[in-house]
Amino acid sequence: LQLRFPLLGEIAATVVVAGGLLHVQLTSGSDETGELLRARAGELAAALGAAGHPLSSLDIRAARGERGE
């Protein structure tokens, strides 16, 4: 998915469900947005778990290839 948010800019999301496991990769358009996404990763994981879709892996990076969690 390619998403565009007024305050965050563009974020690309790849979501894969395999064997009941949820894997998410987020690529932000800026280092600042990448840092914000990493800071809030726990909230995303908690929300997905509460919805019955526990997060198996989360990779957050900036468009330049900076790797996150």
Image (cartoon, rainbow, N blue to C red):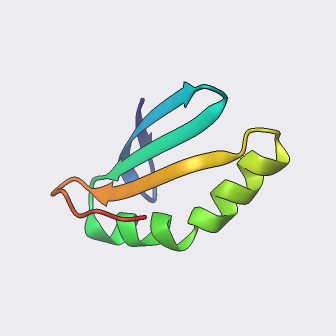
Look at the picture and state if 11 lies above or below 66: above
Name the image quarter holding residue 34.
Answer: bottom left
Where residue 53 sits in the image (x, y, percent)? 74, 39
Look at the picture and state if 4 lies above or below 33: above
Residue in the foreground of this view, choosing between 5 and 69: 69
Name the image quarter holding residue 22.
Answer: top right
Q: Residue at x 72, y 46 (%)?
A: 48
Quadrant for the N terminus, please.
top left
Residue 21 located left or right of residue 4: right
Residue 47 located left or right of residue 45: right
Q: Residue at x 45, y 59 (%)?
A: 7
- Number of marks present in the image shown: 0
Residue in the foreground of this view, choosing between 45 and 30: 45
Residue in the foreground of this view, choosing between 27 and 4: 27
Quadrant for the C terminus, please.
bottom left
Name the image quarter holding residue 60.
Answer: bottom left
Question: Looking at this rendering, what residue extends furthest in the front direction?
Answer: 19
Where residue 20 sits in the image (x, y, percent)? 67, 29
Where residue 31 sits in the image (x, y, percent)? 28, 68
Residue 40 located left or right of residue 65: right
Where residue 26 sits in the image (x, y, percent)? 41, 48
Residue in the foreground of this view, choosing between 23 and 32: 23
Q: Residue at x 58, y 68 (%)?
A: 40
Question: Looking at this rendering, what residue extends furthest in the left direction?
Answer: 64
Look at the picture and state if 57 lies above or below 34: above
